[in-house]
Image (cartoon, rainbow, N blue to C red):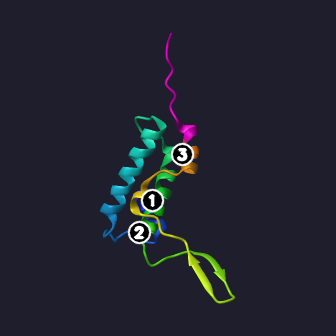
């Protein structure tokens, strides 16, 4: 997963300056995914979800990039999307939870 996240971020393979941080977030998101899906081990299909989520977290930490939310030309107004706090970025969104629901392990009670 580390190599894929680095590729998405445009970090060279030999640059290890952010490896610990990326691995830290991979661990956090993996734990959240396992808990949400009620799984004990990760299924390979979820790797890409985790990689994309970690990529989003790492990009949200980059304060130099702000997306334009709106532009008004008369009297010039430019609004930027508010950056998420790190705590917000690490949380699973409603859409992400819906995507993960198909992997939820259902516990069946025997009567």
- Name the residue tied to disc 1: 89
- Name the residue tied to disc 2: 61
Query: Magenta segment, which residues?
Result: 101-111
Secondary structure under tag 3 reads helix
Query: Would you say 19 lies left or right of 80 here?
Result: left
CA distance for labels 2 and 3: 22 Å
Between discs 2 and 3, the one toward the N terminus: 2
| 105 within the magenta span | yes
Q: Where is residue 88 in the image (x, y as percent from the top left)?
A: 44, 58
Tags 1 and 2 in contact by the CB under 8 Å rule?
yes
Which residue is located at x 36 percent, y 51 percent?
27
Please determine whether, in this image, residue 67 is positioned above or below residue 33.
below
Closer to us: 49 or 83: 83
Name the residue furthest right: 74
Closer to us: 25 or 77: 77
Name the residue furthest bottom: 75
Figure quadrant of residue 40: top left
Closer to us: 43 or 55: 55
| 83 within the magenta span | no
- Name the residue tied to disc 3: 97
Q: Position of residue 33 (x, y in %)?
A: 45, 44
Which residue is located at x 50 percent, y 31 percent?
105
Between discs 1 and 2, the one toward the N terminus: 2
Q: In which quarter of the image is the N terminus?
A: bottom left
Secondary structure under tag 1 reads helix
Q: Position of residue 35 (x, y in %)?
A: 42, 39
Sort mark 3 into few (<14), some (14-19) or many (20+) by Cα contacts within 10 Å: some
Between discs 1 and 3, the one toward the N terminus: 1
Closer to us: 24 or 19: 24
Which residue is located at x 68 percent, y 87 percent?
73
């Amino acid at each position: 997963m580390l190599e894929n996240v680095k590729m998405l971020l445009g970090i060279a393979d030999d640059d290890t300056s952010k490896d610990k941080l990326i691995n830290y977030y991979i661990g956090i998101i993996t734990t959240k995914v396992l808990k949400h899906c009620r799984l004990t081990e990760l299924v390979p299909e979820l790797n890409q979800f985790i990689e994309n989520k970690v990529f989003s977290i790492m990009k949200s930490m980059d304060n130099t990039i702000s997306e334009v939310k709106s532009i008004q030309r008369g009297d010039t107004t430019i609004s930027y999307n508010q950056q998420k706090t790190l705590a917000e970025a690490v949380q699973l969104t409603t859409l992400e939870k819906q995507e993960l629901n198909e992997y939820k392990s259902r516990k069946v009670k025997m009567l």
